[in-house]
Amino acid sequence: MTTRTSAGVTRREQLTAIAAALFARDGYHNVTVGDIAAAAGLSGPAIYRHFPGKQAILAEVVRSGFDEMARAVAAGLAQTSDPAQRLRTTYRDLAAFVIRRPEFGVMWRREYRHLAPEDAAELAKRMGEASQAAVVELRRLRPELEPGDAELMSWAALSVLGSISDHRVRLPRAAFEELLAGIAMGVASAEFDAAAMDNRPQRIDSADRRERILAAAARLFWDRGYHAVTLEEIGAAAGIAGPSIYSHFAGKTDLLRTITERIGERLRLTSDEPPAAEPEPAHSPSAATDRLTAESALAALTTRYVTTVLTSRDLVAAYFTEGHNLPDRDRAETRRFQRAYAAHWAALLAAARPEQSPEEVRIRVLAAFAVVNDTARTRRLADRPGLAGRLRALMLAVLLTPASGTGDVNHG
């Protein structure tokens, strides 16, 4: 018999929702079956009447998310055949889904590595199908796009929608859906030029043992997760004995802290110019000049950000996927830096687009970061020729393209 709670959902659904919230907040490895049971008001053994273990709960969290997402998009697409409207409907329905289920983005982007192999294969296929469906809708609208560019643009739009998993800035539901769908449509309107930018990973000085250790740790943390990696494995990847790491780092926590500090230092260097001053009123004779100056500063900043992320992508991936495993004090310091760094971008965007609300400015800035960070963590995308210039164009589309949806994206 299926147990139902007082709200009418099954106990399995309740446990799935509780687990999703805990995994998103604390990380998969930091949550026990007992934690999930306690949050549901059950004993630990009672969980096993519904799931064989924690991995199965994680798989159900992701699987149920895909099911809900697919139903929402299919229902929306059944109502229209116009290519522009179909694409906007797809993005609006996906936006509605991630607003309802913001933890889904965290599960897929951060915790998928902890799935059992058979679940990982099934759910990777589901993700591929969902992504391909979005590519199909984009190419209905822009058939002139090269397949690789259509895929990159589609992934960028999905990153915009998933970015709300990374922050707590919110708008009223309907307005939030429309804004996210509008930004995603702005991504769909981006034009790529032939500008070349360096997107090669930085070379590690093989003579610098400390740097080799740090690079090996970052790569392994990204591939398998902080908790699944041992110092012996890091040492082997760096070409040294595991215990020799202690000559350079106090342990795994110190390695993760150093990775976080290193990325913080590199990102700080991208914002070495002071933020733009408070924008003058729109009627001021110099307001147009101020807007152009702020746009120019944003363009320069996107160039530096993209280059920094793509030339440090192992460190960046570890920074964004494993930072929740830092001690509380280090996590708090990381959050302070991230807020200050985003505020610098927000000040420039507010000067460039004074008509935008502070909430919209922050949502756009954090979405622009997500486009680059997610791509850097997607290996089949990260080594494409010309990627850096394309990401710069996509960041600027996220930041500067109006979200009204009235722009002409049908270039075919």
Image (cartoon, rainbow, N blue to C red):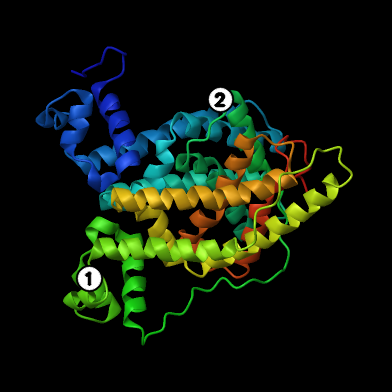
Quadrant of the image occupied by residue 233: bottom left
Look at 47% across and 68% down and name the residue there. 312
Q: Compared with residue 230, is residue 349 higher up or lower down, i.e. above or below?
A: above
Crowd class of label 2 (few under 14; some 14 to 19; many from 20; radius 10 Å): few
Q: Position of residue 173 (x, y in %)?
A: 56, 25
**Gap in angstroms between the C-alphas marked 2 and 1:** 46 Å
The one nearer the camera, 152 or 183, is 183
Camera sees residue 147: yes
Circle 1 crowding by C-alpha within 10 Å: few under 14, some 14–19, many from 20: some
Residue on which disc 1 sits: 233
Question: Considering the numbered disc 1 on the image, is that residue within a helix, a strand or a loop?
Answer: helix
Q: Which residue is mark 2?
A: 173
When asked about the image quadrant of residue 303, the answer is: bottom right
Taking depth in this image into account, of 190 and 198 the one nearest to the observer is 198
Q: Earlier in the sequence, mark 2 or mark 1?
A: 2
Quick check: 297 left or right of 230? right
Q: Residue at x 19, y 79 (%)?
A: 241
Q: Which residue in the rendered view is the most extreme toward the bottom? A: 207
Asked whether disc 2 touches disc 1, contact meaning CB atoms under 8 Å apart, the reply is no
